[in-house]
Amino acid sequence: MPAGNQQLLELELALANIVSNAVKYSSNQPVSMALAATDTRNIIIVKDRGIGIPPEDLPYIFSPFFRASNTERFEGYGIGLPLTNNIIRMHKGEISVSSRMNEGTEIKVVLPSSAREQGRR
Ligand SMILES: Nc1ncnc2c1ncn2[C@@H]1O[C@H](COP(=O)(O)OP(=O)(O)O)[C@@H](O)[C@H]1O
Ligand SMILES: [Mg+2]
């Protein structure tokens, strides 16, 4: 498979995990996305109005098999975000999370544009 296709599939998986969490943990309430591109970066924001993440659990959500204390009613294994985090790191991107209990969660991904990756800038 061409390298570009492989990279696209990885990033698609990374973003699909974020979006499916937003849908799951907001009990199918609307989820919004915002996309922006500059000449050096691509920015993706996924926002939900769901259960939120308890502040004491926030530092651990990228650890394999970790699930926050308020997820009992929801199915899951705690492997989506660790995988997403690894993929984004592999692509030299950054992921950040801000969340409030019972209000919602916002996940922001910043990826370098491929032109910069290839050293053209
Ligand atoms: N949008 C979200 N709203 C609330 N909690 C979230 C959200 N996304 C991730 N989390 C928290 O991060 C944990 C890890 O996410 P993930 O690895 O995808 O596991 P899961 O199998 O639970 O979906 C979840 O168990 C949950 O506690
Ligand atoms: Mg998940």
Image (cartoon, helix red, strand yellow):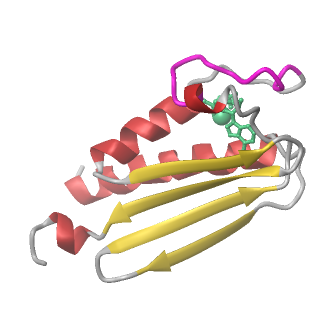
Q: Quadrant of the C terminus?
A: bottom left
x and y, in percent, of residue 59 in the image: 57, 30
Q: Is residue 2 visible?
A: no
Give the residue at x 86% y 50%: 103
> Relative to residue 112, is residue 11 depicted above or below?
above
Q: Nearer the viewer, residue 22 or 110?
A: 110
Give the residue at x 31% y 57%: 5
x and y, in percent, of residue 109 in the image: 49, 57
> Relative to residue 81, is residue 75 depicted above or below?
above
Indicate left or right for 44 with 26 as reference: left
x and y, in percent, of residue 4 in the image: 26, 59
| Ligand 2 positioned in quadrant | top right
Give the residue at x 10% y 76%: 120
x and y, in percent, of residue 72 in the image: 85, 19
Which region shows up in magenta?
Answer: 61-72
Q: Residue furthest top?
A: 65
Indicate whether residue 64 is drawn in magenta.
yes
Q: Residue furthest left?
A: 119
Q: Main secondary structure of the magenta part?
A: loop
